[in-house]
Image (cartoon, rainbow, N blue to C red):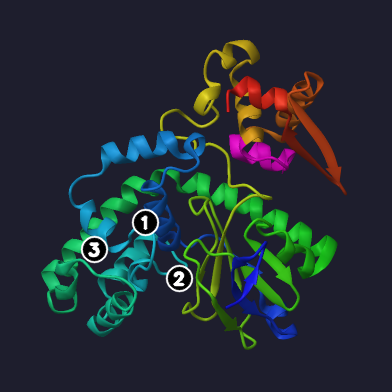
Amino acid sequence: MGEGLGGTVVYRIHFTLEDLARTRVAEPPPLLELSAALRTLRERGHPVRFGAWRHAVRDALDPRARMVLELVPPGGWAPTFLTSSAHGSAQELLERVRATPRAVVRADLAHVAEWQPLPRWAHRLPDDAALLGRLCDALEHVHAVLLAPYWAHVTAVAGTDRGLRTRQAIGGGMDRMLASLHPRRIRWNPPVLEIAMLSGLDGDLHLGGRGLLLVPSVFGAAAPAVDIDAEPQPVLRYPTGTEQSPGPLPGAAAPPGSVPGRARSPLASLLGRTRAAVLSAIAENPGCSTKELAALLRIAPPSASEHATTLREARLIDTVRDRNTVLHSPTALGITLLGH
C-alpha cells in the first residue's frame, strides 16, 4: 500500500521521458464531464458554485433520469460505455453509445459488478435492445438538462485552465505543470505522479510510453479521477483552476455576469452587481489571475483588472505577482463581507 500527500493512500502513475513528451492537456470530453456532473448533482459540496445549478436541474429532470442515476452512482464505478473519455461532439458521442456492441456493454457491466452491485434491471441490458434504447434516451435527456446549457461555460473555463498549464510548462517545464495540477490531491514526485483519490484507490499505472491525457473539469470539483482504460492513452481528470475549482456556475438561475450566490444582495447594492460578482468569484478561486477572472465572469480583462484594483484598495482582496501574472485572493474582510 502506497502513502503520500500527508499519509493519504495514493494511486501512482509512473512516467518515462517518452511519457512526459507525450503528455498533453485536452478539452473536456462531453461524456466524461457529464459523469462528473451526475456525481456532483448528488453531492453537497461547493454550495455557492453549484447550489443554483443543482436546484435548476433537479426541477428539470424527469423520471427517465433514474436509469442513468442508478448506473452512475455518487461514488464507485460506472460503465465505461456511458462515461467515455472519447472526444467529439455530444451528439456524435451519444449516437456512439447507442451503437455500443452488446459484448462491450456486457464486459463493462461485468467489470462494475466486480466492485459494486448493479441495479437488477441492468443485467438485462446486453440482451434487451429496447431496454438499452430507453437507457440511451435517458442519457440524452440527462445531458440536455445537466450539461448542454452550460457547455459554453465549461469549455471557456477549461480553455483558461489549458492556457494556465501551457504557461506553466513553458515557464517551468513539465515539472512545474504537473506539480501545480491540484496540490491538495496531486503531487509530482518525479518520475511518479501521486493522486489521492476519493475512493481510496491504491495502485500503480505504468504509462509505458503512451503518455497521459490531462483533462480539466468544471464539474469534477471534488477530486481528480483516472480512466486507466482510455485509448490511446490513460486520462487524468482534474479540477480546473490553480488550486480551486471554477467560480459560481453561470446560467443556472441568472444570466452570465450576474452576481452569483450570496453576492446578489445586499452586497450588490453596496458594491455594484459586477464588482460583487468579481469579489465572489475571487473568493471561490483564490489565486486566480485577471485573465481567468475575466473568463469566469465573461467580462473584458481590463474591466476585471479595474474592479480588482478597486477591491484591493478597499482591502477586500490581496494581489500578488507570479512572474508576469497577477493573482488575486480574498482577504479576511472580503470573506466576512460575503458571509462565507
Which corner quadrant holds the C terminus? top right
Which corner quadrant holds the N terminus? bottom right
- In space, the residues marked 3 and 2 are separated at their CA atoms by 17 Å
In magenta segment, residue 338: no
Residue at x-position 65% and y-position 87%: 209
Residue 284, x across and y down, in percent:
61, 37
In primary-sequence order, the first of circles 3 and 2 is: 2
Residue type, numbered disc 2: Ala
Left or right of 249 in this view: 316 = right
Q: Circle 2 is placed at which residue position?
A: 86
Residue at x-position 35% and y-position 60%: 91
Left or right of 143 in this view: 106 = left
Callouts 3 and 2 close, C-beta under 8 Å: no
Q: For numbered disc 1, what is the local secondary structure?
A: loop
In primary-sequence order, the first of circles 3 and 1 is: 1
From the viewer's perspective, is the residue at label 3 or at label 1 nearer?
Answer: 1
Q: Circle 1 is placed at which residue position?
A: 74
Q: Nearer the viewer, residue 289 or 11?
A: 11
Residue 159, x across and y down, in percent:
62, 53
Q: For numbered disc 3, what is the local secondary structure?
A: helix
Magenta stretch, residue numbers: 284-298
Residue type, numbered disc 1: Pro
> To which quarter of the image does residue 318 belong?
top right
Q: Circle 3 is placed at which residue position?
A: 136
Instruction: Tell me the number on the disc at residue 6.
Output: none
Residue at x-position 52% and y-position 15%: 265
Residue 133, x across and y down, in percent:
17, 66
- In space, the residues marked 1 and 2 are separated at their CA atoms by 22 Å
